[in-house]
Amino acid sequence: MAKITVLAATGNLMVAEALRQAEPDVVSAYPITPQTTIVEAYSKYVADGRVHTEYINVESEHSSMSAAIGASAAGARVATATSSQGLALMWEELHIAAGMRLPIVMANANRALSAPINIHGDHSDVMGARDTGWIIFIAETAQEAYDNTIISFRIAEHADVQLPVMTTLDGFITTHAMERCELLDDATVKAFVGQRTPINPLINGDKPVNHGMFASLGGAYFKVKHAERDANDASLPYIKEIGDEWAAVCERPFDFIDAYECEDADFIVVVLGSATGNVRTVARELRAAGIKVGVLRIRLYRPFPYAQVREALKNAKAIAIMDRADSFGSQYGPLGLDVRTALYDLPARIPTRNYIYGLGGADVKLAAIRQVFDELQELAAGSLDEGLNYLGTR
């Protein structure tokens, strides 16, 4: 039976605690707001001798991921953390980590990208990384950020996955706000995570290998990318298996999606991350008033759980998709595109309305959520157009 410690903690502290319990061989780190307290806390664990980790202070986030790639290729368990401009600076290296099939675990504090300069939370940074080949979780709470981080090691290092995993949480809203959290004992977590068994490590005198070689004409690059796509798609059952195993240990449910009152809902709002609580609050009020509404939160963003999303939304009369990032030049936001793709094969077409909201940490007030639900009723009645809308600003 796992021992549980209840504490008031921020999301960043819970991620740092999860990393401490998994005890990577190498952590390469560069501070950036609002991620900084993750690596600050971990550096203290190293200094205090609580973990035996090679902690590398690098000069940039590009170097941080470069060091992580080298250490992971050598066979080490590796973790790092970043945010916003730092994640953007890593962009080249993100593709290399996934293309080399390296099981790196990285926490990202979701934050707006410049310009203008902004340090607050939205999903602009993580959405820029959505096509890099990484598995991506987006946590709602500090507790979930802890759980996602722990299972990420098992998922990344699974012999049939071997892909990097990004475990993300919304800047300041989840990273810095205090919540009631449960921390499992170190022995339980260490036993769950286990040890990494590297596949074809770079440092192996008995079996020399090459990593990251030049792929010339003739289809070698094409084949590698095909294999990367297959591995990403095929990871879904392993993610579910490992998530369910952790759920049995911590007694918190796991699924790719969190469908709240969606079974009989006429109107459903699809959302990611920390804004979900506000959407559920309004949904409860409307349910109490006799209006059948639901909330679909997506926990696993890549690979996108199309089948589960389609099943949860198939009976709705109208759907709102809330994006905390835009996809400039596209007809819809990133989540809007994914959800509409999931709905495409349904026999009956469901009208959707895409909302861009909360950019740069702008408040997501209950009145704005009520407006979204009200407009869904108009959309279903045919008195409102579909399309993309900015919520809370002109």
Image (cartoon, grey):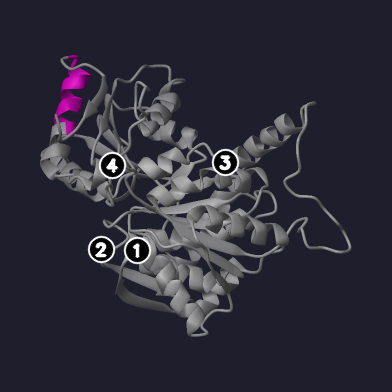
Residue at the image point whose x is 75% and y is 56% from the top:
199
Residue type at the position of mark 4: Glu
Q: Residues within 10 Å of mark 1 (few under 14, many from 20)?
A: many
The location of residue 350, given as percent across then percent down, is 33, 20
Q: Earlier in the sequence, mark 1 or mark 4?
A: 1
Q: Is residue 246 visible?
A: no
- Find disc 4 in the rendering and name its residue: 261
Q: CA distance from mark 1 to mark 4?
A: 27 Å
Magenta stretch bounds:
372-382
Residue type at the position of mark 3: Gly
Q: Are marks 4 and 3 in contact (CB under 8 Å)?
A: no
Q: Nearer the viewer, mark 4 or mark 2?
A: 2
The location of residue 145, given as percent across then percent down, is 40, 59
Residue type at the position of mark 1: Gly
- Find disc 1 in the rendering and name its residue: 11
Q: Earlier in the sequence, mark 3 or mark 1?
A: 1
Q: Is residue 375 magenta?
A: yes
Residue type at the position of mark 2: Ala
User: For this rendering, which residue is in front, 287 or 146?
Assistant: 146
Question: Is the residue 368 above or below the residue 61 in the image?
Answer: above
Q: Residues within 10 Å of mark 4 (few under 14, many from 20)?
A: some
